[in-house]
Amino acid sequence: MEEAGRLKHTVGELLKSQKLAVLSTHNKGQPYASLVVFAATEDLKYLLFATTRATRKYDNIAHDPRVAFLIDSRSNLDSDIHGAIAVTAMGIAEEVGEKGKEAFLKIYLDKHPHLKEFVHSPTCALLRVKAETYYLVSKFQKVFELRISR
Amino acid sequence: MNPSLHLKETTDRDLPRVGGKFLALSRMVKGGLEVPNALCIVAEVYDTYLTSSGLRERILLEVNRKSFAEMRWEEIWDASLRIRNMFLTTPLSQDLLIGLKEGIEREFGDTPVVVRSSAPGEDSAKASFAGIHESYVNVRGTQNILEHVQKVWASLWSDAALLYRQELGLNVETSTMAVIIQEIVEGERSGVVFSMSPNDPSRAVIESVYGLNQGLVDGTVEPDRWELSRSSGKPLRHIAPLREKKVEASSGGVRPVTLPPDQADRAPLVQEEVARVFDLAMEAENLFGAPQDVEWTFRGSTLYVLQSRPITTVSDPAPEDQRPWYLSLHRSFENLKNLRLKIEGELIPAMMEAASKLAEEDPGALTDNALAEEIDKRQQIHDHWVKVYWKDFIPFAHGARLFGQVYNDTMRPSDPYAFMDLLGDTEMMSLARNSLLEDMAAAVRADPTLQRALREKQFAMVEKDFSRKLEDFMERFYDLACGKAQCFQGADGIVPIVLEMASHPPRDKAVKAEGAAALKEAFLSRFQEDEREKAEELLDLARTSYRLRDDDNIHLGRIEGRLIDAVEEGKRRLRERGMTDSDRLEVQAVVRALKDPAFVQEALYHREEEKTGFVVKPRQLIGQPSGPGLAKGRARVIRGSSDLLAFKAGEVMVCDALDPNMTFVVPLCSAIVERRGGMLIHGAIIAREYGLACVTGIPNATSLIETGDLLTVDGYLGIVVISERME
């Protein structure tokens, strides 16, 4: 139990400290990765990002909402191999509707206040990924799985 | 952190916090000169505000949206306006407010003040950049002062500053701004003194006007001028102007007033006062150790120093540097009013006359030599009007921008371009033309027999009423599609467009007059009696500016149309002579070839494609959000008038520069994409009128995008996505 608390804390801190994440979607089986500006809810149940609706990632998600996220602390140094940590999150994405949007928007904009104009554009969608599993990789090869119980 | 500093407590060490201007004031106070009371909001306050509100990142996003090298002046103005609006709509945090309010309240109470910039580094720059940052005269009350402090901060990102960003070393991370709040001394006589004349190092120069200095500084009031010997202080020359006006404080600003006769007849300074101003300049020079340019004012017999700075010699800009021209576009309201009289009263009538005179000569009836002369003549006339266009019409177009600034200051709308909706309900020629087209389309829609007759080109079967409409239209708008290839299309050009329009339901115009009326009232209701009148006058000016921006293009298009007519005739004859690619000749080459049958054109340039092993396809292009809306449609890239005439309903118009002579297809468009960028360019204006999504400022739009590409145009964010290309 204590281990779970510690892992959750590590994942939470990483998610707070990083601004960008790699989002993976696919188009008829062809994987597609893109960099997005993201935020996470305090309980780590949701990951949030914004995109305009004409993008490939949005299109891919519309066809299959299963996605993966990669968030890491590397800084392009040799020491990253042992020093950096990485989290892969898997979950289901959906566009946040008008209901409940305000609360999610606040979390997102508190972290990225400068994206105000962008997320308020009628052409921009706020998406939330309901996280199911986190994989935490540290020390090059050490991997833990953290499954969200709902 | 103490958010503000007094003149007496400031030392040389504070330079990075208070900027050169404030430090100079402080040194003068300590040197015993009479300086009006002032307070400095130090640079750290600006930094804290930017960081704590997230504004810094937003500015970074805005200035990095597109490379400056790819931006036109209008786009720079737009970027600056958006940044200014961010400042206006981002409140100060409670912490900052409390700290600032107390100091300002205590120091100034209800006394009117000047709020101006003192950017660290501003006056030490090699060249002089006077006027790059804003200052505000006659501001009263703490809340009001704070709002103006934000405006001065915003002016760190003024269009002028963005234009001279390299010289200024402008940088979102490091650039900062201190603000001076200084009590206004309402002097009866004011002026500037140069302790060393920029033209003659042995002389000093004094310029003086009645009233406040603003009239002298912005050039609306002609000053008395004295030249004095620097060594003895003896006046060598006095040049008296025709004294007509002075500038005085009025509620919330300044205004020009007519001079009373006794002042108009008398120089603002007597001999003894000229000597005192000269002495002041020398004292300042001693204090700062270099020749000074000092602003001063007399209230009663007290001589106050308002500002002192080292004299900077401004070298003439390189001839290819057009930034000074651009900066000259910032005109005062008075100046724009005069310009309006000139444009409406002289220039437009003269342009119309020039166009109809040109129409009298039929190029087809001329000999080759005479045709060459005629082309030359038309080219000269066209060149002349293009010059007028740059000199007078474009500056006048900035009337709309002046209004935009006032509107945003007053209403603080979340959309910095909301003001355009107020300008929209004026009758524009191209809209009038489009509504005539829509009229004809409606007639065709309602009458299948007429439709068939037109489709089968059975013009004899077309009923009189419609024929008359068609003739009227061609008479009024002769040059329907004055494009790059061909000008005159006649009924063959118009009829397919009318048929295409008729095959779709009519489109509503976006801006409804009653909406504009409500906006207008909301705006005007913010002003008191006499101010309201001034605001109304400004709105009227802005509407004229907005409308003329369109009309002058049409008039210019008429003149250009006659030039193209003559050139086309020349090309036709050259083709008959066997010059198969005469279409690609420049105007002057046509003239030469007509005069000299032996003329051989130089090899035309063919673009060689680089072989890299990669095929590049644009996917998402970034420009300026110029008309809110989202649309998806096939691209129709406009390279010549034949592209316009092939336009199908629902297509996205992709063009280099949409001019009013192309707008007749706008009712068929689903969106507009343009290479030329800006919010107040024609494409953006017309898109807004029709409620179309519009993105401008896409570099190389017409070569990157191809007719038939499936586009998604996001007019909110300025994005064009090319989602499918027909291979």
Image (cartoon, coloured by chain):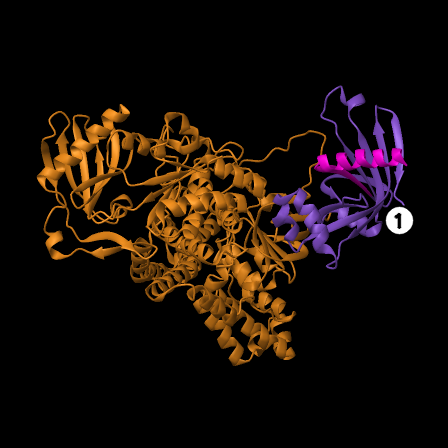
Chain colours: A purple, B orange
**Residue B615 part of the magenta-drawn span:** no
Foreground pick, B335 / B172? B172
Magenta segment, which residues? A1-25
Foreground pick, B8 / B489? B8
**Residue A8 part of the magenta-drawn span:** yes
Point 47% across, 63% down: residue: B422
Position above or below: B618 against B670:
above
Position above or below: B459 against B283:
below
Point 80% across, 21% down: residue: A82
Q: Quadrant of residue B283?
A: top left
Foreground pick, B550 / B565? B550
Could you tell me if residue B374 is visible in this image? no
Could you tell me if residue B24 is visible in this image? yes
Magenta stretch: dominant secondary structure: helix
- Left or right? Give the position of A54 relative to A26: left
Q: Position of residue B545 (x, y in %)?
A: 40, 58
Q: Position of residue B651 (x, y in %)?
A: 64, 58
Point 46% across, 62% down: residue: B423
Q: Position of residue B288 (x, y in %)?
A: 28, 26
Q: Chain of mark 1?
A: A
Position above or below: B137 against B46:
below
Q: Quadrant of residue B333?
A: bottom left
* Residue carrying label 1: A150
